[in-house]
Image: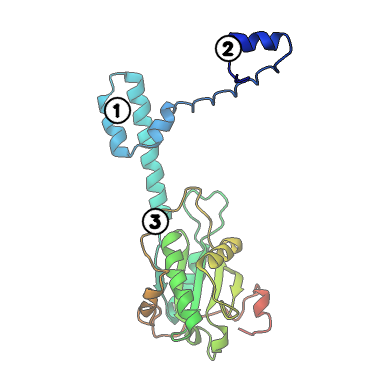
Amino acid sequence: MNPNEDTEFNEALRKHGILPPLEPAPPSPSPPPSPTFDDILEGLTPTELRQLGEDTQDDTAERYIAQHRAQRLAQERLEAQLNRFGTVIPIGRDDYTREVTEASKQDELADDVARGTGVVCVLYKDGIPRSDRAYIHVRTLAARHPRTKFVSIVGDKCIPNLPDSRVPMFIVYRKGEIVTQITAWGSDRERRLEELEVLLIASGAIIPSKKPPADSGDGLDDESEEEDTSSQGRSKSTWANKSVRNASKRDDSDSDFDL
């Protein structure tokens, strides 16, 4: 006899206290909620929204779909205007003020905070492994965060007699001011792209998107790309322009180094 079977005989034994009561069956899990109409629309492209609006027979639904599509298109246009950069821009002496200091003063569209543009100036030197590796990371981050401007220049063309021990160097600007400075990145150990990304986010150079980042498809973090990190395309041959040496805000790690 199986005491756990739900039979009349076992039920009689339970009524007389001979068998313990059956344990209640666990409740069935609730089915997932059905997607709302807005959820369905969010998963459609503007083209699919237009086609859905044309196919619907309900005037109210058609107007709602058209409104949703217009909002989506406006949002995409704004994002396209905000994503102004996406590559590492080589600069030289005559470009520095315009491409770095002045560029960081420009507020983004629809920016109520008026916080300017994040600009990351990368000082590098070919043939130094940590510098080559950092430049690969910078190319990846530039593609991943096109709202932030990344520029590059050979270190001793920006700061005369800059020691090799100080490169790669990152100088971060916003609103025309240096907000942080990072020197000799990766000199202590090999650094990962994610570490640099977090550091630039913390400094305010990068403002993370609320949406998951799209796959840039650059594949620039692979070791096989290191041969592309030569000075060609990184900086112009002229000297960088001005006033990093007058910066009032510096990273603590560089407090002993006079720019």
Secondary-structure class at tag 3: loop
- Residue at 48%, 66% (x, y): give it: 103
- x, y percent for residue 44: 35, 37
- Residue at 43%, 32% (x, y): give it: 39
Q: Which residue is mark 3?
A: 215
- x, y percent for residue 75: 41, 43
- Residue at 41%, 56% (x, y): give it: 83
Please identify, in this view, whether the residue under mark 2 or under mark 3 is nearer the observer.
Answer: 2
Query: Which of the 4 image quarters holds residue 13?
Result: top right
- The amino acid marked with disc number 1 is Gly
| Mark pair 3, 1: CA separation | 30 Å
Please identify, in this view, whether the residue under mark 2 or under mark 1 is nearer the observer.
Answer: 2
In the image, which disc is placed on residue 7? 2
- The amino acid marked with disc number 2 is Thr
| Mark pair 2, 1: CA separation | 58 Å
Q: Which residue is mark 1?
A: 53
